[in-house]
Each structure stands twice: as structure tokens, then as C-alpha cells.
Image (tube, grey):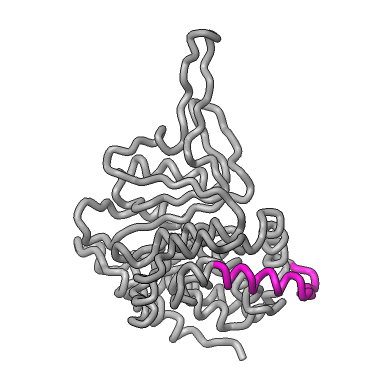
Amino acid sequence: MASSALALDDNSLDQLASLRATVGAALEGKPAAVDLALVALLARGHTLIEDVPGVGKTTLARALSHAIGAHLSRIQFTSDLLPSDVLGISVYDQRRGEFSLRRGPIFAHVVLADEINRSSPRTQSALLEAMSEGQVSIDGTTLPLPDPFVVLATQNPQDFAGTFPLPESQLDRFMLRIRIGYPPPAIETRLMLDPPADRLARLSPAIDLETLKHLRNLADRVSLDAALGTYLQAVITATRHAPAIALGASTRAGMDLSRAARARALLSGRSYCIADDIHDLAVPVLAHRIRLASYSDGYVATREEAETAIRDVTNRVPVPL
């Protein structure tokens, strides 16, 4: 993406710092997860938060929506959830003699798709158009979604009972897949004394939606020079030729890695990307989008195996000096 010279002013840097501090205050002790969620937010991407129950997945989503002053629409995905429960449905009004649209919870700036892998693939696919194009189709009518529109989905590991693996087409719509993990013991003790819900209630929003749009525009203008573009392309191409990987990263994945790298640079207070922005984001951006060669033998690879495969790729691709 071509970009004009970008000069970061103190106000924008203060807004970014306030955004990071507000979300971090709600999810204490997890700065890496907070930064990745903010990278996706600034890069206009959607985030898949995958971890065991009870480590703060929903708290992170709530904190993010609170920090930007947005209303959070929460959808609890279950095995009996229907696409119309997500998108909405046309209802016939007998008094008026016509159909009227009853909009579903997808019509919100921030949508929390809680435990998304507990619903059927048919219901999961209801999010595809929304996440890709910012619109939904209901009974032949296409309707735009609010701008900005962000999906934060949580899911438990696939070996938990009652879960359906997300199909490749759905996974490819998530810019980042992140994990949170257990907090350090000292912080975990403090959380038991001061629950996150109480902490969120005491926090003020860091920015508003218009400021978010401004920061996103700044991220678009962060410089990614030709040498880094060649490096990024080499990483994407290497995933398609690695012996351990049967299905490599898509073009969409490469574009997402580019946008995420720009957002990471902005969050770090830089107007330009460095190689580390691409290298360090390769795993959260790419690992959930590939299929390992062992998959074709009837074995579904673990998350750790997919992440190791991406690390092996990035370790083999020369970093520009």
C-alpha cells in the first residue's frame, strides 16, 4: 500500500498510550495479548481468542469495546443457534400487511462471538460476509453494518467436548489468533480480590469511535518499504513450499500481515515498519490459516504444531538488513 510521509503528533501518541493502558488495566499481566488485540483493532481486523475457559477471553473483548466507547453486542454460540439468530429475520406485520426486518445482534460496532466453535458450521458461516465485506444479506436484501465493525470471537480448544472446528474459509477471515494464558500468581491473587468486572466499571473510555477511525487512517499511512515487502512476500511464499505444510497462507493472509505490521509499528510509536513487525506477527497472523501435511492422513494438527511450522518458516527466510 502506498503511503505518504507520516508524522506522529503527541496527541495521537497519547491516545494510543491511553488505549493500551485502559485495556491493560482490565486484563492485568497480559501485555502481549492486549497489544495483539489492539493491533487487529487498528488494522481493521477481526480477532480469534482461543484458550481454555476462565482466563479472560470475554474480559479482553469487553475491555476493548469499553476502551473505544462502543456498545458490545454479545452472541452466545450454541449448538442450536441459527443463522437468523445472528443476522436477523424478516417478520410479517399483519397490521401493516408487509414484512419488516428485525435486525440481529450482528448490527453493532463490536460483536463478541462467544464460544464460536460450539455452533454448527452453518451458523458459523453466517459471519463470513459480515467479516469480509462489512455487510449482511437477509432475504435477498443487502444491508451495511456499522462502521467501524469488529468481531472478537472466543473459542475453547478443539479437544473440548461439544466443539466444531472452524472451517478454513472462516479462519481466514480472522486477522489474528491469540491466546491469553494464566496470569502470574501475584496478579491472579489480586484478580480474586478485585474482579475484572468491577475494574471495568471504574474505567473511562480511552477514545471514541471517531478517534479510532483517525488512528486506523494513521496506520494505513505507516511506511513499509520495498525491502520489507519482498521479505513479507518471501515468508508467505515459503509457507506454500514448506514440506510440513500442505496448504500455505493465502493472499488475504499476506495482506493482513502487511496491515498488522503497520498497526504494530503505529502502536509502538513508529511511522515506519521494521522487520520485527513482520517476523513477530507471522505466527498469530498465519498459523491458524495453514493446514499441515499430516492433516491429509486423517490427523488434525494441534495449534502448537501449526505455530512451530510457521516459526520454522520465518527462521529460514533471510531477514533484510
Percent of width and height locating residue 244: 32, 74
Q: Main secondary structure of the magenta part?
A: helix
Identify the residue at image location x=54%, y=40%.
107
Identify the residue at image location x=29%, y=54%.
165
In the image, residue 131 sits, relative to residue 154, either above or below, namely above
Percent of width and height locating residue 145: 58, 41
Check residue 105 for magenta coloring. Answer: no
Q: Quadrant of the C terminus?
A: bottom right
Q: Looking at the picture, tell me which residue is in the foreground, 188 or 310.
A: 188
Q: Which residues are magenta?
A: 3-22
In the image, residue 48 sits, relative to residue 227, either above or below, namely above
Q: Residue furthest bottom?
A: 321
| Residue 156 picture quarter | bottom left
Identify the residue at image location x=49%, y=14%.
93
Check residue 18 for magenta coloring. Answer: yes
In the image, residue 137 sits, relative to residue 210, either above or below, namely above
Residue 252 in view of the camera: no
